[in-house]
Amino acid sequence: MKFRVHGGSKGITFLWRRPKFVAMVMLHLAPPSYLIRRHNSISMQHSELKLQRSSLKQSQVSSDGVDSRSLWQSEKKLLNQSVLAIICDEEPGTKLYPLTKRRSKSALPIAAHYRIIDFVVSNCINSDITKIYALTQFNSTSLNSHISRAYSDVGLGKDGFVEVLTSYQSTEDLGWFKGNADAVRKWLWRLEEHQVEDVLVLPGHHLYEMDYGRLISAHRDTGAHITMAMAANGRRNYDTSLNFLLRDPVHELKLTLGSIQDQSLIVTTGTRTYPDLDVKNMGVYVISKDVLFRLLREELPYAYDFETEVIQGAVSLGMKVHAYMFDGHWDDLMSIQAFYQANMESISKPFNINFHNKQPAVYTLPNYVPPTTISDAVVKSSIVGDGCLLNRCKISHSVIGKGTCIGDGATIEKSVVMGSDIYQAELQWNTALLQGSDIPVGIGEKTHIQKAIIDKNARIGKNVKIINRDSVQQCDREACGYIISGGIVIVMKNAIIPDGSIL
């Protein structure tokens, strides 16, 4: 992959490989002075924010030293003034097909009540970051509608907002977004209106619970130009206070630990080890605003992706790029199996992600539908959304989405049923002929579903068996309304499965 790096009037062409994050020791690279120079045109508001942070630190110093807890709580109050969040809906989501056939990854329903993007937006709001843009492009109709309606009443303050910025064409550029960095570049003219100190770049399709304030505080305390969050794959033995850097030996990024002069592949600090295969780039970046503008406009005008081009380019230019170790639970939801497993884990209590507690809150679009009606149904270890009609059925270890109608004698096991966009009264569900089909939206009588994902508005007839009886791992029956991926049967959105079918 080639891209041009502009330094003044000269251009340098680099040939890069995909980065590997390997835990190694630090080789401190001194950044060139022209890269760390601040713009003389930084506004007075920007300068005042830095002065406020400095005065907060000084005011917290006592004879016993700094009260870090009080300092952190005071500094957090400034984030809504000094940080702008950008959520990027990056890829078409082909690995999640057919769930992403008519929607983006970020808009996928999860845990019977939420969309995936709700967790990223809620992380921002709970971190007191209330200036939020969502950059969308692929299958974005559902996502745009959700964002525009879901967060208007969550108390973002006078200057707060959650706003959609879609891909567009102009007289200057007739192309679409070519990557997350390119998407941010094309909207820089809008972002420069905000007098903030740092920009937080986030993917919209990951599932995790994180206080971004601590990440931003680490970014500022180390004086980094860029700080990237690294996930420890759910392991909890990482010391997030340790100082990591990224360096570039022979054009390959290495994760390095600060102030240790050792070239071993595994860095050991006390009882903690940092093996090279146990951390992943979360795609979460804190970038100083003036550095972001300089990189995307001047130094790397042809870089389209943050991970494979911008970060490597910044390191090669001598910028200070730090890695922040996040030791919480993180899912990238990059496959059908990962999406299915996240839903199954949402049933457990307690879970790694907040599906059950009030605080920290997870904000989403309110459902203005009646409560769920249960008529002699047996429900075990499951989540059931609002507006469902559950007749004499059996449900175990499953997620049942909003507006699902399940007929008498049906059995649902270890499955995800996304529900219906159309709420139907019980009489209508039993008798209505919808869209020319005599099979209504929902699950028919005496149907058995096991280890499956049923997308929205699916019409599953009576005496249907969706059990993958032959243990097929991969199967494409899209013309018949379903596919099998990793042994999981996925019934597509709006699909019609006739009475007596066996899948």
Image: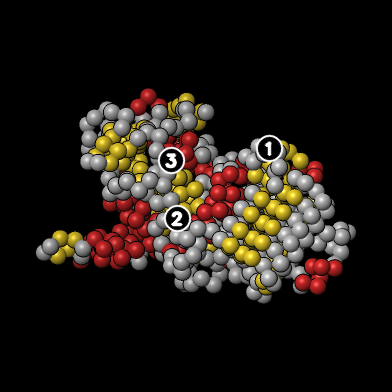
Q: Which element carries disc 3, helix, strand or loop?
A: strand
> What amino acid does circle 3 point to?
Lys
Q: Position of residue 325 (x, y in %)?
A: 35, 46
Q: Which element carries disc 1, helix, strand or loop?
A: loop
- Disc 1 crowd rating (10 Å Cα; few below 14, some 14-19, many 20+) is few
- Quick check: can you spot residue 91? no
Q: Which residue is mark 3?
A: 280
- Disc 2 crowd rating (10 Å Cα; few below 14, some 14-19, many 20+) is some
| Mark 3 or 2: the one toward you | 2
In screen coordinates, is 74 left or right of 339? left
Q: Alpha-carbon distance for marks 3 and 2? A: 18 Å
Q: Position of residue 58 (x, y in %)?
A: 20, 62
Q: Position of residue 320 (x, y in %)?
A: 33, 40
> What amino acid does circle 2 point to?
Asn
> Of marks 1 and 3, which one's residue comes earlier in the chain?
3
Reply above or below: 2 against 289: above
The residue shown at (30%, 59%) is: 50
In screen coordinates, is 279 left or right of 462? left
Q: Are marks 1 and 3 in contact (CB under 8 Å)?
A: no
Q: Alpha-carbon distance for marks 1 and 3? A: 31 Å
In front: 434, or 372?
372
Q: Alpha-carbon distance for marks 1 and 2? A: 31 Å
Q: Which residue is mark 1?
A: 472
Q: Which residue is mark 2?
A: 352
> What amino acid does circle 1 point to?
Val
The residue shown at (24%, 61%) is: 68
